[in-house]
Amino acid sequence: MSDKWQALKTYHATAEATRILDLFAADPARAQRFSARAGEMLFDYSKTTMDDRARALLIDLARVSGVAEKRAAMFGGEKINATEGRAVLHVALRAPEGASILVDGHDVMPEVRATRARMAGFANAVREGRFVGQGGRITDVVNIGIGGSDLGPAMATLALAPYHDGPRVHYVSNVDGAHIHDTLAGLNPETTLVIVASKTFTTVETMANADTARRWMATRVKTPASQFAAVSTAGEKTAAYGIDPERVFGFEDWVGGRYSMWGPIGLALMIAIGPAQFDAFLAGGRDMDERFVNEPLEQNMSVMLALVGIWHNQICGHATRAVLPYDQRLSRLPAFLQQLEMESNGKRVAIDGSDLTTHSGPVVWGEPGTNGQHAFYQLIHQGTRVVPCEFLIAREGHEPDLGHQHLLLVANCLAQSEALMRGRSLEEARAIMAQKGATGAELECQARHRVFPGNRPSTTLVYPKLTPFTLGQIIALYEHRVFVEGVILDLNSYDQWGVELGKELALALQPVLEGRQGTDGKDGSTAALVRYLRG
Ligand code: F6P
């Protein structure tokens, strides 16, 4: 354990028994003092065991880890992705008008703006019926991509459903043929536009689905390539695939896949909601960037979100974190964050190649409320492991005539964080059972089943309404959280070598499964599974 962690670990050992309710009792202003604002957005982290001393030590940790310096390096276009020798500049995709950002002495902004203008031109042509398929106006857009070329835009397209006024947009990612089969089943090839979204344009799943879509298109459309567009950093590969460069939207290798929805990878989203709403989404991200860069660490929502994460995972030892949006339209947010956080901070070595001295980022999982309440909340309330919970809730829904349901949603969200913190003691449980008429050993046993330990930490992010601007703020907030946690853990958040081995082995297994190669050299289990699956 390196020194920078020691003070926090030591303090935590002395404060381990802290009860959150006692912290509230001792400080009537705790809710205000342990929350951060970003415009109308409120991040409440008061229902955690973090106290003033812990927070001060966490902020020291951020300082000594060089968060401010590394933040400046990222925004300044330095090659902080050391293992790939790349800058990390997704923030350039939403940078303010007039900004100039240099990479290797070259201003990247003119190209960013030009590509966005081309995207908007194409999106408008599709939306207004000036770009047509063989059968006329485009009714459906199918985005084929996976990972960062799918999760972000798919999550946002669902989140912003009230703003859809373009053609229907569908997302296909899985190499399982069922996904593309079921998606294309109801569509007319003559009025469908296919977008192949792949940073590298080599991803096996995406290329297999693109080939399937092209064959499907060819059954009815004379020149299938004319109804294809591509989003990629690999211009020569999209050309080799026969896609007209006019419908190819490029980006640079300084945009990581999981950070790429702000640029051309967001094309399908832009077609769904229109360039103006897409701009509002970018403006939300930009707003959070400015706050992240300018606000002092202790008031900085992105920094505090990260420090709560470090507190729970590395200091308190809670290995997982539940993301619980009380917003049905954010139902893909947990999946998006799984990639964003786990592909970024799921590393075992520090930037210099030495072993990490702490655990890497947490396991992130979740489902929207209230559905999760009827599924896994049992474990969250009464299981033996503590799962820090991150609630998200809008002040206002998009359905004014269903305000009473929004109220129920809010009540449930607040009730869960309250129940997690408050719990129910054995005495309270005994009183409940006594009221029901239980006595003796029966009362005691039944009461024990009804105890909630409480003191389970949670945070709540409250936003006014799920608009494009708000969504932009939320996504940028989480991106910066990953950055800050990565800096504190001293790892490279922007590579993903851990996905490579499985890809290589899958390639090598193809001839084995086809029967062109034997199972020699395979372990006993893999060989037996191959034999079974070959039938
Ligand atoms: O396998 C992981 C990954 O490389 C992700 O990082 C990326 O978002 C995804 O695959 C898709 O890659 P591409 O956009 O190059 O098809």
Image (tube, helix red, strand yellow):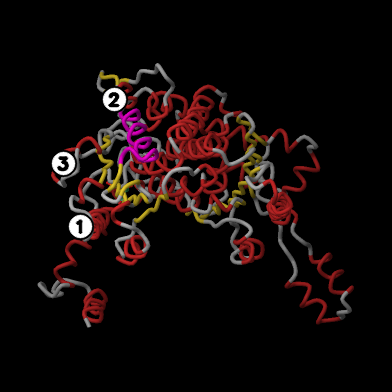
The residues bearing labels 3 and 2 have C-alpha atoms spaced at a distance of 19 Å
Q: Which of marks 3 and 2 is nearer the N terminus?
A: 2
Q: Does the magenta stretch include residue 118?
A: yes
Q: Mark 1 vs ligand 1: CB under 8 Å?
A: no
Task: Decide which of 497, 406 is in the foreground and name it.
Answer: 406
Of badges 1 and 3, the one in the foreground is 1
Is residue 239 toward the left or the right of residue 66 in the image?
left
Q: Which secondary structure, mark 2?
A: helix
Name which residue type carries label 2.
Glu
Q: Please report the residue visible at 80 percent of the width from the left and 40 percent of the height from the top.
A: 26
Q: Please report the residue visible at 35 percent of the width from the left and 59 percent of the height from the top.
A: 187
Is residue 219 toward the left or the right of residue 184 in the image?
left
Name which residue type carries label 3.
Ala
Q: Give the range drawn in magenta.
A: 115-131
Q: Earlier in the sequence, mark 1 or mark 3?
A: 1
- Measured as percent of width and height from the top left, residue 225 is found at 20, 48
Read off the residue under disc 3: 239
- Measured as percent of width and height from the top left, residue 302 is found at 53, 34
Q: How crowded is mark 3: few (under 14 residues within 10 Å), some or many (20 or more)?
A: few
Q: Which secondary structure, mark 1?
A: helix
Quarter placement of the N terminus = top left
Read off the residue under disc 2: 111
For the stretch drawn in magenta, what is the main secondary structure? helix
